[in-house]
Image (cartoon, helix red, strand yellow):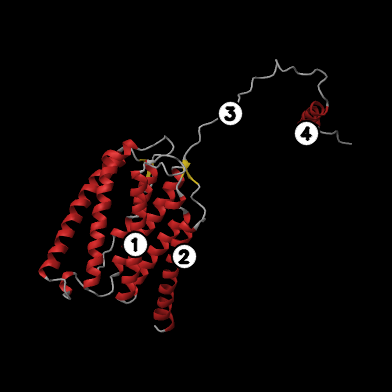
Amino acid sequence: MPRPNLSSLSLPLAHLLVLSAFAVVHALASPFPISSSSALPQRRADPDPQPCGFDGDDNTYGLGIRLGLYIQGLGTILSDFLEPGEAKKMKDVNLSFQLSVFGGLIYITITRGSTQAAGQLYAAEVLMMLHLCTKAVFDPNPDPSQALVAIHLVQFAFSLTMLSYTLWFLFIGMDQMAHPPCSRYAFVLAKVDMYHWYRLARKILAIIYTVLDTCGLVWTLRQLYTGAAKGNASLFPSSAPPPRRSLLGQFIVLAFIVTSTELLIRWNHIHNVYSVGGTGQLIPLIVSSMGFIPVVYKLFIKYVVTP
């Protein structure tokens, strides 16, 4: 009869012995109570920790207002596939939306945020609202008709006003506004500190855009004064549907606005702006939706039902 190989059983027996020892230790209660003086000292939590972030103004840039601006911007781009009259209506409404948001920004700047829930104005929320107003100044497809030339002039004037505010904000206002360590971030395809190189780069770009917009406004006024805009298609290159590259550029701009706005809110810990409540948010959301639905319906009829 062969003898059992005890060496092959030694490792499992050792494992079993260790597990049994642990079971006995956990099963038996210690007969000696541990005094509080011998216990390891525990770190006490701060009874009043400093909260990170601040409460945003839902009446100025709440979820309903932001969704309304996004829907209106998308509808304005899609309206370029329809007749010029439809595009004009959408551009008028879109410009009105942007003007109302910028007007709210001017108001909270004058009051220094004293009417807001946070009680003061933060640089992060100003930067975020400037992003929301960007779509109104990007219209690469102006119509040569007299009515839309007037809208184009309003866009130039609005753009210059917003750029003037941006220059004041970058050179002076940022230093006067609250910017705690966890609420001072900007978006440049990544999370960056708005008070470092980003600020210098934005100053340079704002100056360049201001010069270009001023030249564009002067040129358009000169064309109107000389009568070139009165039914003359030479004022603008063409009244044909916009090229694909132009539409792609508008979609990229809108995607950048949506992404940067939502990331700025998240990164800078702006609270209480993710719910739709009150008429101040419902009205712009309903108005933009009522304008967007007919555009989608007409596009469906034009390109799907009767191609």
On the rendered structure, is 77 left or right of 13? left
Residue type at mark 1? Ser
Mark pair 3, 4: CA separation: 52 Å
SS for callout 1: helix
Residue type at mark 2? Ile
- The image shows residue 103, relative to residue 91, as above or below, that is above
Please identify the residue farthest to the left as the structure is shown.
226
Examine the image and state in which quarter residue 177 appears.
top left
- The image shows residue 228, relative to residue 282, as above or below, that is below
User: Which numbered circle lies on residue 286?
Assistant: 2
Quadrant placement of the C terminus: bottom left
Mark pair 2, 1: CA separation: 15 Å
Mark pair 3, 2: CA separation: 44 Å
Disc on the earlier residue, 3 or 2: 3
Q: Which residue was labeled with disc 1?
A: 96
On the rendered structure, is 172 left or right of 116? left
The answer to the question of whether label 3 and label 4 lie on touching residues, with beta carbons closer than 8 A, is no
Q: Residue at x 38, y 58 (%)?
A: 255
Disc on the earlier residue, 2 or 1: 1
Disc on the earlier residue, 3 or 4: 4
Residue 32 seen in the figure = yes
Q: Nearer the viewer, mark 2 or mark 4?
A: 2
- The image shows residue 140, relative to residue 212, as above or below, that is below
User: Which numbered circle lies on residue 12?
Assistant: 4
SS for callout 2: helix
Q: Nearer the viewer, mark 1 or mark 3?
A: 1
Q: Which residue was labeled with disc 3?
A: 47
Examine the image and state in which quarter residue 149 appears.
bottom left
SS for callout 4: helix
Q: Nearer the viewer, mark 3 or mark 4?
A: 3
Mark pair 1, 3: CA separation: 47 Å
